Image (spheres, rainbow, N blue to C red):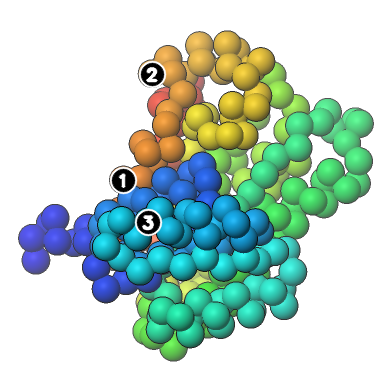
Amino acid sequence: MNIMDKFSLKGKTALITGGSRGIGLSVAEGFAQAGADIAIIARGGVAAQAAAEGLKKYDIKAAAFSCDITIPSEVDEMVEAVEDEFGRIDVLVNNAGTAVIRDAIDMSYEELTTIIDLNLTSLFVVSQAVARVMKKQGGGSIINTASMSAHVVNTPQPSSNYNATKAAVVQLTKNLAVEWAPLNIRVNSISPGYIMTELAKSMKEWHEKWIPKIPQNRMASPEELQGAYLYFASDASTYATGSDLIVDGGYTIW
């Protein structure tokens, strides 16, 4: 097989949580350009529907599904609906997540558990539900969005809750990779650095402190992550599992 053919996603279906904006939407666009059919999952049904409609210009099938992934029963219903609509799920991108910036000494219990529930617990629940579909099919690829915050303590913003969940995502990825390797389900994670998403834009007051610490001296666009996600989603990475790929402009090097 030609190496470029290995990067094709034609005939595959990808389910992407948090797929209506930011990194998730950019990944969806990259996958659609590579030929994948796309299931966009988001809490906001209108935004998800708009994202799905926009992907159809790539001549692929796309559909939106509204789901609160912190509620296991909704996840089960959503995964069943995606399987019914597309017939299979070949790739899962666990991208939904958020951050609450608060000094640990002042952080409320709710600010802690909300981040854990969305960034970590729901990732496990969605992975479990989709893995059951992949098991029936004979395999698949799961890609978890972690963060360079899994590897360093970001400054100056206090984000112990966020950083802890992302470190847990990397370790969970490794555990699931080992457990599910016999099922031909690969599980990898990607750890982005500072990406110019809506969330990062809302933290503009810190940009002047972040950028000098990045060897490439800039933040990235979401499109600059598409190749990393495509690698793990495609047959170009059939021997990669349990890996964490840091894409941070060199931030974690020094």
The residue under label 3 is 55
Q: Quadrant of residue 134?
A: bottom left
Please report whichever mark, 3 or 1, sits nearer to the chain's N-terminal start: 3
> Is residue 83 placed above or below 247 in the rendered structure?
below
Mark 3, mark 1: which one is toward the viewer? 3
Quarter assignment of residue 59: bottom left
The answer to whether residue 12 is left or right of residue 159 is: left
User: Neighbour class for label 2 at 10 Å: few (<14), some, many (≥20)?
Assistant: few
Which amino acid, mark 3?
Answer: Leu
Name the residue at 53% across, 52% down. 20
Q: Which residue is mark 1?
A: 227
Q: Give coordinates of residue 13: x percent, y percent.
A: 37, 71
Q: Is residue 87 visible?
A: yes
Report the quarter where the N terminus lies: bottom left
Q: Are marks 1 and 2 in contact (CB under 8 Å)?
A: no
Q: List the residue tagged with mark 2.
A: 216
